[in-house]
Amino acid sequence: MTQTITIQPITRIEGHAAINIWLDDAGNYKDARVNYMSLRGFEKFVEGKPAEELPDIVCRICGICPWMHHLASNKAVDRCFGVTPPPAGHKLRELMQTIAHAEDKLLNFYFLAAPDFVIGPDADYSVRNVVGIAKANPELAQQVIKTRYMVKMILDKFSRKTIHPVAGVPGGFSKPMLEEERREILEKMKQVLDFSQFTLDFAKKNVFPKYMDAIKTLGVITTGFIGTVDEKGGHNLYDGKIRLMKADGSYTDFDAQDYADYLGEQVVPYSYGKFPYARCWNEGFDLDVDHPKGIYRANTLARINVADHMATPKAQAELEEFRSLFGRPAQATLLYHYARLIEGVYAGERAIEILSDPTITDPDVRAPFEPQAGRGVGCVEAPRGTLIHDYSTDQNGLITRANLIVGTTHNLGPMNLSVKQAARALIQNGNVTEGILNRIEMAVRAYDP
Amino acid sequence: MGVRVASEWLNSCSGCEISIIDMGERLLDILAVADIVHLPALVDSKYYGQRGDQKHLSLPEADVGIISGGIRNEEHLEVALEMRKKCNLIIALGTCATHGGIPSLANTYTVDEIKERAYSTETTDRPDAYPSEGLPALLDACYALDEKIKVDIQLPGCPPHPDIIFSALVALVQGKPLSVPDKSVCDTCPTVRKGKGELKKVRRFLTAPEYGAPGEPLDKMRCLLEQGFLCMGPVTRAGCGGDGITPRCVSARVPCRGCSGPVRHDGNQLLDMLNALASNGIDLKSIPNRPLLLRFSGAHALLKPVFQERRSS
């Protein structure tokens, strides 16, 4: 008789998913799947709505990365209406996105991922969480909560609303930045950069060496990667070309407007979420653990794999060290956590760069435009991966069609592969412990925002 | 032993949970007096036992149950019913839970229409059948919590401000009554109103409102509705700014879209707004898209599939 194990809900991730594992008579792995349980219908219900309202609607796709949806949507509407934001409007948008990334790295590492590494994967579930961390390391916990709160309040105070932002508007930004605001935020972002560097150093010293065996084995699969690069091939979160890399390191760069020529989405019977794949590789789609086809990964590890270099000095030094240890492209799934903290350093450095440019306080932040028929693709790198909003409008500027490829979904196929790999390796002869099941979940958590 | 708290997210985005974390250091004060027994975003408690071998969904007992998100599928419903059974008191957290929220905009379409679009976009390889294996079936609409279970406390907001969440939790722990704002956004908005004017039409938000110099305080800016923008302040519950009074969006020089839901729990933001505009002599035809006036409160059967509206009219 086969046995089914259901891990539901997958916890310490954003969103609704479950893992099912099937064992054979001998209690060994037969198959495993990740179900994505949610279908809300955004691609349908935005139809007919005035395009300029979309940035405030679609941010509700995700409460962890609302700035990403908000800005990808604004970029798409800009294109539909043929408007280019003035330089300060563009800079304010990138600044908000960059600071949101900096916050996200702290949230992910300390609140979601660290319990597995700091408390331990086999610890009782009642203490394997941020509360457990707060009790075990009260001073660190307080500093984490204070710093993360400071970053969040920078966004909140300046943009007025940061969970489900409203300050990005088609044509630019809704309000200019004052000189005193620029100085205040610049000072705070210097502190944030210090803390991001501290976090990476802490993890390099206390976390990654201890878990090197797990890093080399848990959820490890071989895939391609996707991410955004600037005109020099450098890592970029806000703008640039999309780079799609094969597992052998060869790659193609393309304009986000042409994404549909390169990417496809598979529908699988066990997931409401669709599984994007590299249609342009002409090898189809297959979730065979040892020989996947069409599968690439997105999110932090993918971005630092596809980039020729990091565009800021401290992050570049970290990338060089990372590459000397793990090569390019690095495939080990738990390295997402390492890559995430390198991006945290980048986000701090990049925010400081943007804020050091005094022209960001130019009061001209929004360009005029008229609604018109058009088509536009807006793309940014969300924490979980390359985020694509593609809209068409009619002559009144109402949405006639929307196609969304959300960062998370690029990794739905890879998460399935990593879970299959982990379950196959860890479950032997019917021995299923809570620690083993948590390790299988860790293969999913690596991909979280 | 502290107050036992269980929390669940249903048809939601996790913004409400992030708003809980955005209490900052106050979160540590809460954790000092509360035991979190279930909270999927942060704690590893499972529905089918910690080893995944139980047949039925089960949640731990708790004094306070916090639920974000509306009810869109059978799993949401099962979890909501189990939360109601195991928790002494249920808080509906956020406008999705209290009024459906943005996802209830889907209520103008049937489930088939939603799936037809999702699984036939330009990049999608069209399947022979829609996904269903191991997946909860969708209900016919997105429901607010109180349409399916009894709710003790309604805390709207998209998301509710951390100050509001903190005050609510402190009141619960101390056994004190809870005060939720019962004014409108307009009642708390400092912008300049000159009363009934010459405005005949509302306009879309295509240009920046006039607000003077970049740092000009809000009480020097003319009311956005009087500037002609469709600002939902008159029919939206106040409190989005937490202990600060200023409406958040208006202070970003952007009209209120109504994210805290109607001023009274059972109000109708669409009808109330149409009344407000009509009584000021504004041409209702100038509203670009009426369902958008219910974009945050389309549950409670206020938004329905278009064909049903046609059939009934």
Image: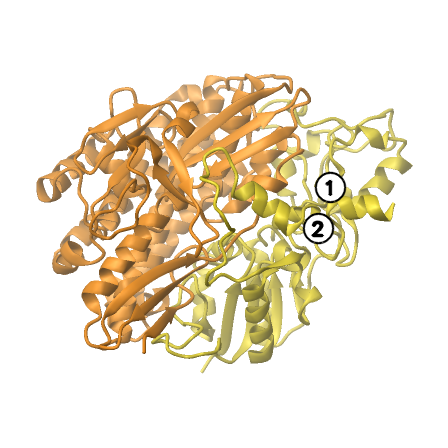
Q: Nearer the viewer, residue A423 or B176?
A: A423
Residue B82 % position (x, y): 56, 75
Q: Which of the chains is orange?
A: A
Dot 1 corresponds to which residue? B291
- Furthest residue to the bottom? B1
- Please check whether the numbered discs 1 and 2 fall on a single chain: yes
Residue A56 % position (x, y): 58, 38
- Asked if the residue under mark 2 is in contact with the one under mark 1, i.e. CB atoms within 8 Å, the reply is yes
Q: Is residue A17 above or below residue A387?
A: below
The answer, for residue A208, to whether it is visible in the render is no
Circle 1: residue type = Pro
- The chain identifier of the residue carrying mark 2 reads B
Among the two numbered marks 1 and 2 on one chain, the one whose residue lies closer to the N terminus? 1
- Residue in the image at 42% along x and 37% along y: A387
Q: Secondary structure at mark 2?
A: loop
Residue A13 % position (x, y): 39, 57
Circle 2: residue type = Gly
Q: Is residue A7 left or right of residue B30?
A: left
Dot 2 corresponds to which residue? B298
Residue B291 % position (x, y): 73, 41
Q: Quadrant for the N terminus of chain B, please.
A: bottom left
The answer, for residue B223, to whether it is visible in the render is yes
- Residue in the image at 35% along x and 60% along y: A33
Q: Secondary structure at mark 1?
A: helix
* Apparent colour of chain B: yellow
Q: Quadrant of residue A244?
A: top left
Q: Is residue B97 above or below residue B82?
A: above
Other residues around mark 2 within 10 Å, as few (<14) / some (14–19) / many (≥20): many
Q: Is residue A194 above or below residue A72?
A: below
- Residue in the image at 27% along x and 26% along y: A252
Q: Quadrant of residue A219?
A: bottom left
- Residue in the image at 35% along x and 64% along y: A130
